[in-house]
Amino acid sequence: MISPAFQHPFGSTIDRTALSARLDAANSWEAKNRLLVQLARELPGFSDTERNEEHRVSGCESTVWVMTYWHDGRLQVAADSDSRVIKGLLTLLLTAYHDQAPDAIRQFDLEGWLAKLGLTRFLSASRGNGLRAIARKIVAAASDK
Amino acid sequence: MSLDISALRAEFPLFGHYPDLVYLDNAATTQKPRAVLDAERAFYETSNANVHRGPHRLSIKATEAFEAARAKVARFINAERDDEIVFTRGTTEAINLVAYSWGAANLKPGDEVLVTALEHHANIVPWQLIARQTGATVRAIPVLADGSLDRTAFLSLLQPQVKLVAITHASNAIGTRLPVLELTAAAHVAGARVLIDGAQVIAHESVDVQALGADFYVFSGHKMYGPTGIGVLYAKAELLAGMPPWQGGGEMIDRVSFDGTTFAEPPARFEAGTPAIAQAVGLAAAIDWLNTHDRAGLRQHEAHLCALLDAGLRKIAGVKVIGNTADRAPLRSLVFEHAHPFDVAQFLDARDIAVRVGRHCAEPLLESLGVTGTLRVSFAAYNTVRDVERFLAALAETLDDLA
Ligand SMILES: Cc1ncc(COP(=O)(O)O)c(C=O)c1O
């Protein structure tokens, strides 16, 4: 049984262009925060059993869980967080990495994209579970392939 | 109130650059008054040379400034002697020094180090490391649900095998002030030495190490309006005299030869290498700065801010304060019924309000209180009633947004 957590729109019906447009339109910190919280609502959460140690990416300020598997040569990614802002940011990662081929994942310039969106601060914010660390984990999964 | 807080705040150049900033992360580090910044700069401009070495006048001047800073620290905490003050990088290094010097020499298998469940990791991990090396054991005195220390448990844990009781003067995570005078007296009766971590107290109240009876007292300069990179280990002279060096290098030796090296007297024995000279001078300036203000008045001002905060928080639904002992450092740790502390902090940051979230390097404490993280508001002397009002208003709106 594939977890319902993989049934999210990010990377499939919502792509990078669509997400970029929404984030660009949010032109203050306050608006960006609100949008991230909004995006978090569109991402189904993990079940209690899926929020386990194996899926946990270590962090101090908030907790992030990630699951992956391969389907037809494409990486399937699901992610969740107890923080809604972080969960909103996870939708960006999913849009970049979910349902992508290994080459696309390895070549994607996450930092460049986040810089363009004005979200660089989240790369290393929240030590350990900054977006950079989470992305590294996903890319590592892709590199095994 | 007779204190002019806005004049005091004007002494901090950072607030000139960020006039709208509500800085409530003072337990992490405080801002620096101009007097401290000027003192460091003046040292480099007029006195800079290495200390304890040069046969030239500039080196003598630098050495005098460095040793004057030591003397100033000694008076500040009422040490009996100047050579009871060892300069370190901060609280963390001071505790590690005691662990690797005193601990390595005095702990043996079967011995115990008692810490409290309120400790910062800096007062837990060094003891675990030295315990692993010496065969000693580290035990934690539990806390009660209100964040106070379980004194009954303390007394029953205080057995003859306890060689050291290492306790915080106040918790950085929830503010609890420990009755260190009483705990120290009990530990001494039981034959144990006492280390007090003063990191969260030193900026807010006068400390008298002799009155406390502390064997070791440690703190960081950067949490008391001074520079980063400088901290203090106070230790009773008779203890320092018997402690072996923990780091080798220049400055700490008497004679070096391949047949055997002999070591300098304290405090030099514990200050290997070139010390943080300008930072020590900056710390002395921070002490002078504190002493030019009415410290009791500042403490009252900070308590007043806490009282306003507490009253305001009671009016906002879905907020819980973690730890509610009567006697707390000027900080509050909050959790929210419907919002994650990190999210709240993000929304506050968008309104120029700086707070800290997470486990505050006190994982065992938060775990025993059953919370995974909190949002911490911590005050310093330059915070204003307006800061509290802006925080409360922003918090109420943020919690509405996130509901
Ligand atoms: C109670 C306590 N102990 C120790 C430390 C460590 O201090 P430092 O990082 O300056 O060495 C801190 C600082 O966060 C603290 O609050």
Image: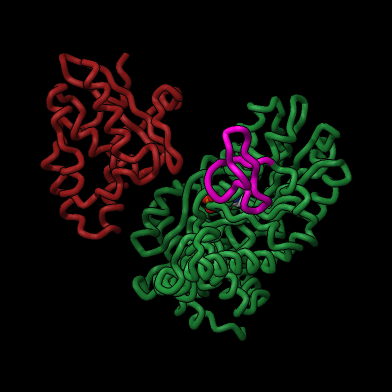
Chain colours: A red, B green
Q: Position of residue B83 (x, y in %)?
A: 69, 58
State the image coordinates of residue A17 (x, y, percent, origin top left).
Answer: 11, 41
Whether residue B35 sits left or right of residue A92 in the image: it is: right
Q: Is residue A5 visible?
A: yes
Q: Is residue B107 left or right of residue B191?
A: left
Q: Which residues are magenta?
A: B244-269
Q: Nearer the viewer, residue B382 or B138?
A: B138
Answer above or below: position of B164 versus B168.
above
Query: Could you tell me what secondary structure mostly forms the magenta stretch?
Result: loop
Q: Position of residue B13 (x, y in %)?
A: 40, 74
Nearer the observer, B260 or B343: B260
In the orientation shown, which residue stands out farthest toward the bottom? B2
Q: Is residue B143 magenta?
A: no
Q: Is residue A48 above or below residue A110?
A: above
- Residue drawn at (42%, 33%) of the image: A58
- Quadrant of the rendered structure where residue B77 is? bottom right
| Residue depicted at 35% across the width and 71% down the height | B18
Furthest-left residue in this view: A17
Quarter that holds the C terminus of chain A: top left
Q: How many labels, in total? A: 0
B290 vs A32, left or right, is right
Q: Is residue B268 above or below residue B33?
A: above
| Position of residue B268 measured from the top left corner of the image (x, y, whole percent) | 62, 52
Q: Which residue lies at the image location 71% right of the left edge and 51% below the top edge? A: B216
